[in-house]
Amino acid sequence: MVQSATLPAYDRTRLTPGIVHVGLGNFHRAHMAVYLDDLFAQGRDLDWAIVGAGVRPADAAMRDALKAQDCLSTVIELDPKGKTARRIGSMIEFLPVASANGPLILAMAKPEIRIVSLTVTEGGYFVNPATGAFDPTAPEIVADARDPAYPATAFGAIVAALKLRKAARIKPFTVMSCDNLPGNGHVTRAAVVGLARLSDPALGDWIEDNVAFPNGMVDRITPATGPRERAMAGTFGLGNDPVPVTCEPFRQWVLEDNFPAGRPAWEKVGVTFTNHVHAFETMKIRILNGGHAIIAYPGGIKGIEFVHEAMADQTISVFLDKIETTEILPIIPPVPGQDLNDYKTLIIERFSNPEVADTERRLCFDGSNRQPKFIIPSIWDNLARGVMPRGLILSSAMWCRYCHGTDENGQDIAPNDPNWDALKAAAKRAKAEPVEWLKQREIYGDLSANRSFVEAFADALNLVWSQGAEAAMRAYLSD
């Protein structure tokens, strides 16, 4: 029986643009776009519709797909009690994808655009992983600084648009990151201001003094789209949609209220505005994103395909629970209105949802950017309180084992990181000399100088290689 998808509950012809969003992946379309869709359904803030944009050649395919369906996105919520689908109508245009980002720059320069938002992945902010600071030596940044009128990056386009607005005496837009980064507003400010100063120091100073970069915490699990998800769209009469989004029912958004150019009334549709974003962010990044990394690599090594299957593995699920309880929760500061144990329980329930069918491979992706943000800080915090976090260390050792490129069943692991070749080479050296893995200072920083940590890591990696991931986890659980 074909079910029906819910259509937008408002007249889309009344929408006018207020936001340019860069990065029209699954997460954005199941998160910010949905919150705006809910708001428009209340008849509110119809002048805050989204203009979509991309800065990579691959974004052109998404543009073609969405333009063919009037910029409507299909979002399917995967509740174990029953799936539901809706068409999200909050985006009204998708700009042409151009090598020098001319259409994007001109759109952001228009006075009606009051927010520019971003989902460009954790690794897309040109941050030195070891220092957490903006990296002005990144080749893309060097290129944009050399030719700022023809930028290739989102940040270069933002700088160019702000320069036009400054010259025209148009109030600057707010720049809002929607990526999973500690202090994502601060990181975005560093990238935009840092890039501007490389070619125009006065413009960089003006941006720092006049442009708002609110911090925010975003959360919703959205698997990649494949044949399963496209077939699912067909069960709702949407079989011609090549880019449907599936997601869990849960969603959360916590924001600083720092929008001098105005903002939608997101608080009317469940967004939390608070001065304590950092506390929510630390909770989420350490427990959820850290939890993803904890279950990703043992599952990847053991050849497990789906996240819910990893959670059904008794050793992996207990491994996760012990690390969360003993090594992560104790280092998280209090969060207003939140019980950390309840939040941990919720995360475990969300990971276990079989309908989501999120993959271990997706969780394993881009460890070179995710480990320094989601795991390494928790290791440092434990060491600072006099605790050797052997579970987190074992988790990082299993990432090393995964990067060797074969699982425990002898199957090849396809490249799964932008720095895969370097990681694979380091992992091969580390099989005999574990400290070789820790020499990646851009990931581990000064941890390689901590003798006790190095010994614990070597013990963990040697155990994984000699006895396997299962035995290594059981040894940790028996302590």
Image (cartoon, rainbow, N blue to C red):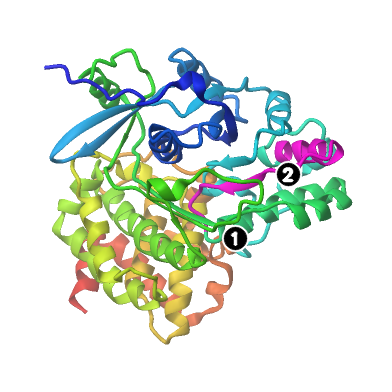
Look at the numbered disc 1 and give the secondary structure of its residue: helix
The type of residue carrying mark 1 is Glu
Q: Residue at x 71, y 34 (%)?
A: 111
Residue in the foreground of this view, choosing between 21 and 13: 13
Residue 143 visible, this orientation: no
| Residue 322 place in picture, x, y as percent | 24, 71
Residue in the foreground of this view, choosing between 194 and 477: 194
Label number found at residue 172: 2
Q: Is residue 161 magenta?
A: yes
Residue in the foreground of this view, choosing between 219 and 210: 210
Label 1, residues with CA under 10 Å away: few <14, some 14-19, many ≥20: some
Q: Residue at x 36, y 34 (%)?
A: 224
Quarter assignment of residue 468: bottom left
Sequence order check, earlier mark of 1 and 2:
2
What range of the chain is rendered magenta? 156-181
Q: Which residue is mark 1?
A: 442
Classify the position of the C terminus by image quarter.
bottom left
Q: Residue at x 52, y 49 (%)?
A: 122
Quarter assignment of residue 347: bottom left
Label number found at residue 311: none
| Residue 63 place in picture, x, y as percent | 52, 20
Classify the position of the N terminus by image quarter.
top left
Q: Residue at x 42, y 60 (%)?
A: 285
